[in-house]
Each structure stands twice: as C-alpha cells, then as structure tokens.
Image (cartoon, rainbow, N blue to C red):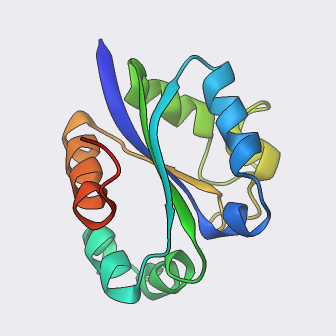
Amino acid sequence: MFERTLSIIKPDATKRNLTGTINKIIENNGLRIIAQKRLKLNEEQAKKFYEVHNEKSFYNDLIEYMSSDPIVVQVLEGDNAITKYREIMGSTDPQLAEEGTIRKQVAISKQENSVHGSDSVENATKEINFFFKIAEIVG
C-alpha cells in the first residue's frame, strides 16, 4: 500500500550535522523524501505537537529538547511507508535497536534518539497537516 509518513530529524542529529547521513539511510531503504524543511519549533508548537504525552513524566524534558535546536521535518513516500520507516528508525532505545537502523547508528539515548516517525495512517495525516500549517512543507 502506497503511503506517506512524517519524519522528524531531531535536534541531537541536526546539531551533529547528520541530516545527510539519515537521508541516505532512508533513501537506501526504498523510501523517497518528497518534502523537507529545516525549522525551529518554539515551545508552544512543541507542546501542541506532543500534547498526546502531556500527562507523562518525560513531557517537559521532551518539549525542552524538541524546541532546543532546529529540526528537519520531512514527508516520506513509498510502499508501506509508515511501517517501513518505523523499521528503518529502530527501537526508541538505541542500545536495543537492530544493526543498520538509524537509531543504532546515530542516536545518543532514549530521548536523544535522532528521529521521529508517525505510527499510523491517521497520525501521519495529522502530523503532516500540523507541519504543513506551520512550515508549508508539502502541498
């Protein structure tokens, strides 16, 4: 099934100039990057994007982290793009991630795990629309 998904290259990765490295992994695994924009979330935007986690203990740290430095927002396209990208990203904990995944190769920790990817068709649509409104990344 042909799909689109959202990818975010997070502050820890942009700070270390890893956008090209991550893009190469994405493209080498059969997904196309059809839109990409570098931007810096303010605290309000980060809170809105991650509001689903607002009751969790890590929420404030997540907001501080995601608004600390620029991110790269992307729309990826391909067959089963959502599932495929989640496999390419690897486990949230880089120590548990499989060899060859983005997080195994470049993530620092469970929080500074370098990338975000949508987890469902519904969330992919919602997340792409969220960033389209603030960054005009895809039409």
* Residue at image location 52% in from the left, 85% down from the top: 61
Question: How many dots with numbers?
Answer: 0
Image quarter of residue 42: bottom left
**Residue 41 or 37: which is nearer the viewer?**
37
- Image location of residue 95, percent across then percent down: 77, 51
Compared across the picture, whether 113 is left or right of 73 comes to right
**Is residue 96 something that shows in the picture?**
no
Compared across the picture, whether 79 is left or right of 112 comes to left
Image quarter of residue 69: bottom right
Screen quadrant of the C terminus: top left
3 w.r.t. 40: above or below: above
- Image location of residue 132, percent across then percent down: 26, 55
115 w.r.t. 68: above or below: above
**Residue 76 or 58: which is nearer the viewer?**
76
- Image location of residue 101, percent across then percent down: 71, 35
* Residue at image location 24% in from the left, 59% down from the top: 130
58 w.r.t. 106: above or below: below
Screen quadrant of the N terminus: top left
* Residue at image location 36% in from the left, 36% down from the top: 5
Compared across the picture, whether 109 is left or right of 54 comes to right
Image quarter of residue 110: bottom right
- Image location of residue 58, percent across then percent down: 48, 80
**Is residue 131 something that shows in the picture?**
yes
119 w.r.t. 134: above or below: above
